[in-house]
Amino acid sequence: MKTDKNMVLQSCLANAVNLANLVEYAKDSVVSKTIIDKSVGTVTLFAFDAGQGLSEHQAPYDALVQIVDGSAVLTIGGKDVNAKAGEIVIMPANIPHSVQAKEKFKMLLIMIRA
């Protein structure tokens, strides 16, 4: 049986897809869908309900966030960055960061392990 992860990946292979349609919002939740999961990096799509977030943490690699729908506040090294649909933000390696949904939003997270 195919996993949900494999089904999402298969739907994207050699096809044009709308990122926002690959993940649905859930009340009071953060939903994630892994698109690619390799030893060299990951591509993950998230849907955050309003008021949800990711607590402060850090990663050993740079991460690129693309806002797909709505807007979010990313706090990086103590600095608030407001980002809206169509914009990208790079979260530098080893710098504490967090994500807060003031409204519903979706983001694509790309992390390259290099």
Image: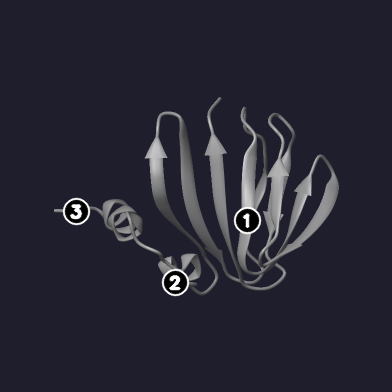
> Could you say whether the residue bearing mark 2 is in a helix, strand or loop?
helix
Look at 62% across and 33% down and name the residue there.
Answer: 59
Look at 24% across and 53% down and name the residue there.
Answer: 3
The picture quadrant where one finds residue 7 is bottom left
As drawn, the residue found furthest toward the top would be: 114
- CA gap between label 1 and label 2 equals 15 Å
Q: Which residue is mark 1?
A: 66
* Kind of residue at badge 2: Asn
Q: Is residue 13 left or right of residue 62?
A: left
Quarter containing the C terminus: top right
**53 and 60: which is toward the camera:** 60
Label 3–label 2 contact, CB within 8 A: no
- CA gap between label 3 and label 2 equals 20 Å
Q: Earlier in the sequence, mark 3 or mark 2?
A: 3
Q: Which residue is mark 3?
A: 2
Q: Which residue is mark 2?
A: 21
Q: Residues within 10 Å of mark 2 (few under 14, many from 20)?
A: few
Q: Decide if residue 101 is in sight here.
A: yes
Q: Which mark is residue 93?
A: none
* Kind of residue at badge 1: Gln
Residue 30 horizontal/vertical position (percent): 52, 61
As drawn, the residue found furthest toward the right would be: 79
Look at 31% across and 61% down and name the residue there.
Answer: 11
Which marked residue is nearer to the observer: mark 1 or mark 3? 1
Label 1–label 3 contact, CB within 8 A: no
Residue 37 horizontal/vertical position (percent): 39, 40
Q: Decide if residue 53 is in sight here.
A: no
Residue 64 horizontal/vertical position (percent): 63, 45
Colouring convention used in this rendered image of the protein: one colour
Look at 62% across and 56% down and name the residue there.
Answer: 66
Q: Earlier in the sequence, mark 1 or mark 3?
A: 3
> Could you say whether the residue bearing mark 1 is in a helix, strand or loop?
strand
